[in-house]
Image (cartoon, rainbow, N blue to C red):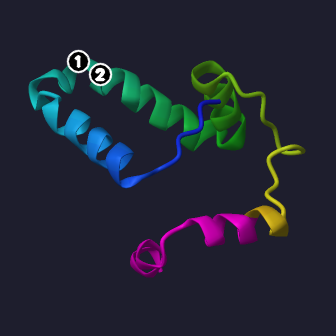
C-alpha cells in the first residue's frame, strides 16, 4: 500500500491533478464503478478486502484490519486541528 504524507504542497498537487481531469471521460468508467459499488453492496467486507488486494496490493481481512487505540491517538496528533474540526 502506498502511503502519502499530506503536506500543503502535496495537497495542492493532488487538487491540481484532479482539476486537470476532463469530466467528459467519466462515462468511460461509469459501468466499472457501478459494478464495484454493487459488488460492495452485495458482498460488503469481502468485496472491500478483494478490491484492497487488487488495487492496493494489501492483504487485509477482518482479523488484521483493526486499528489500535494507540494508532488512533497517533493519527489525531498528526492531523491539523482545523481539519479535525471540519470533519467533526
Q: Most prominent secondary structure in the magenta stretch?
A: helix
Residue drawn at x 70%, y 33% as measured from the top left: 49
**Looking at the image, residue 21 lies above or below residue 19:** above
Horizontal arrangement in the rendering, residue 45 relative to residue 2 (left or right): right
Farthest right residue in view: 63
Is residue 26 placed above or below 46 in the rendered structure? above
Q: Is residue 15 magenta?
A: no
- Residue of label 1: 28
x, y (%) of residue 31?
33, 23
Q: CA distance from mark 1 to mark 2?
A: 4 Å
Where's the N terminus, which quadrant? top right
Q: Please state the extent of the stretch shown in magenta in the rendering.
A: 72-88
29 or 21: which is nearer to us?
Answer: 21
Q: Quadrant of residue 75?
A: bottom right
Q: Is residue 66 left or right of residue 74?
A: right
Front in this rendered view, residue 66 or 47 = 66
Q: Position of residue 64 (x, y in %)?
A: 86, 43
Which class describes the residues within 10 Å of circle 1: few (<14), some (14-19), or many (20+)? few
Give the answer, above or below, for where 20 lies relative to 15.
above
Res. 44 mark: none
User: Residue, x 72% and y 28% (percent of image)?
Assistant: 58
Relative to 61, residue 24 above or below: above
The answer to whether residue 33 is left or right of residue 53 is left
Q: Are marks 1 and 2 in contact (CB under 8 Å)?
A: yes
- SS assignment at label 2: helix
Q: Position of residue 76 (x, y in %)?
A: 63, 71
Q: Which residue is mark 2?
A: 29
In the image, residue 59 lies at what x, y percent? 78, 28
Q: Residue at x 48, y 30 (%)?
A: 36
Amino acid at each position: 500500500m502506498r502511503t502519502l504524507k499530506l503536506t500543503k504542497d502535496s495537497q495542492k498537487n493532488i487538487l491540481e491533478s484532479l482539476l486537470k481531469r476532463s469530466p467528459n471521460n467519466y462515462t468511460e468508467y461509469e459501468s466499472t464503478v457501478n459494478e464495484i459499488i454493487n459488488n460492495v453492496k452485495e458482498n460488503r467486507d469481502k468485496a472491500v478486502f478483494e478490491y484492497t488486494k487488487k488495487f492496493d496490493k494489501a492483504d487485509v481481512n477482518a482479523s488484521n484490519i483493526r486499528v489500535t487505540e494507540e494508532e488512533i491517538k497517533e493519527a489525531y496528533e498528526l492531523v491539523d486541528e482545523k481539519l479535525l474540526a471540519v470533519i467533526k
